[in-house]
Image (tube, rainbow, N blue to C red):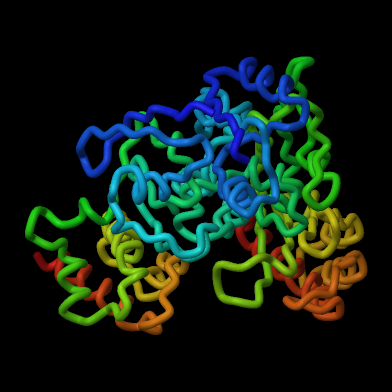
Amino acid sequence: MAKHHVTTTINGEAAEYLCEPQETLLDVLRDEVGLTGTKEGCSSGDCGACSVMLDGRLVCSCLVLGVEAEGKSVETIEGMADGEELHPLQQKFLEEAALQCGFCTPGVLIAAKALLETNNNPTETEVRYWLAGNLCRCTGYDKIIRAVMDTASDMRGA
Amino acid sequence: MSGMRYEAPGSVDEAVTLLADANGAARVLAGGTDLLVQLRAGMISPDVVVNIKNISETQGIAADGGGFCIGASVAGAEMGENAALKAAWPGVVEGAELIGSTQVQGRATMAGNLCNASPAADSVPALIAAGATCTVAGPNGQREVSVSDIPTGPGQTSLGNGEFVVNIKLPARPANASDAYLRMIPRTEMDIAIVGAAVNLVLDGDGTCTEASVVLGAVGPKTITVADAAAALVGSKVDDAALAAVSAACSAAATPIDDKRGTVAYRTKVAGVMAARAAAIAAERARS
């Protein structure tokens, strides 16, 4: 079966790749494009480790076909820092040790950034529900939630 | 699935031709939140997957004769962001928004939820209570079908070869009308309903219910429309006596399964509790 030639935008730059019709956007990002910051956890849309932004919407890249990115804009964890300068969420996660093994962290950061872009003053309940699709087996979530709340507070004060 | 083809037609007719030519070996891709999981698990191995999201008729939420026309590609998140839709049909929107995580909300569609035909589909009871219809396109043209006629059993639909759902239509609303959907899940979030209950009702000027529809999900192979519960609401002020009658009627109508997430006895009781609470919420919304 012929591969599809896909032209898209990844982290603001034009990108193209060849993919099989059944390959997911997650497969493509990791195996064809070489962006391995996006993690494969469950591959069934339950864990959120593969979270990316697709045309400004938070999605699980395991639930999107690679061919569906044609003409769209994809943002991954690799695009979150501005060069050497970490995004405030990344900085806060380090300062407050809001991670242990780190496997869920790229997905959590992408999801948290999407939240703060629509709501810069979320309640703890809103943060917990927004991130309900990002599973973490290490932290027990409290440090993640606190880091997101603290980042929001800093960003409002800035 | 190694030989799977992917097509993204730009028109309804092209999509129908692709689906019809595959003679049952095609799958429609809308949000993909069920389809991609089924593909990955090897539960299905279609010859062709037809992405309908590039078809303009499946896109967006439009005013339609006083009601709304919601394209089959519209994700839950888009519904939640539509203030007019949310004001008119809060129960329909809250059903759709209960499906999965924020990430899943960015993709999952009501049309997909309907055609996946899970007995526990969260968006379906409120659609049926609303009297929603859908446009089905197929080789013989388009037809308007009641949403309640689409699922025929777990994973089964009435759609024929080459047919797909193009949009879902919600009717115009009289004054003092509203709806609500509640579900019970064993966890706080990210779970499948063990009971779902939708209530849609209309009140008159003094708060007496003049029309009602009560629909249960997840307590039978298909949704259950509980006429006795609706009859208990009509003519009442949606007071405690009416809510008790709704509860009793819904528990009597429920025919749930026993599984690790809920027993028959629990689901039967909770079906009544959820329906009564949903009726109270719908009435409160209709009064305000």
Q: Is residue B191 left or right of residue A40?
A: right
Look at 57% across and 38% down and name the residue there. Answer: B30
Of residues B81 and B231, which is closer to you in this image?
B81
Residue B10 visible in rendering: yes
Q: Is residue B271 left or right of residue B81?
A: right
Residue B264 pos. (x, y %): 86, 76
Residue B203 visible in rendering: no
Q: Dividing the image into 4 quarters, which one contains the N terminus of chain B?
A: top right
Look at 74% across and 67% down and name the residue there. Answer: B195
How many marks on residues?
0
Q: Quadrant of residue B134?
A: top right
Of residues B89 and B138, which is closer to you in this image?
B138
Residue A4 pos. (x, y %): 44, 28
Look at 41% across and 72% down and name the residue there. Answer: A128
Look at 42% across and 48% down and name the residue there. Answer: A27
Q: Dividing the image into 4 quarters, which one contains the C terminus of chain B?
A: bottom right
Q: Is residue B103 left or right of residue B23?
A: left
Q: Quadrant of residue A83?
A: bottom left
Of residues B34 and A66, which is closer to you in this image?
A66
Residue B224 pos. (x, y %): 85, 56
Residue B99 pos. (x, y %): 58, 57
A62 vs B9: above or below: below
B229 vs B159: above or below: below
Of residues B179 and B77, which is closer to you in this image?
B77
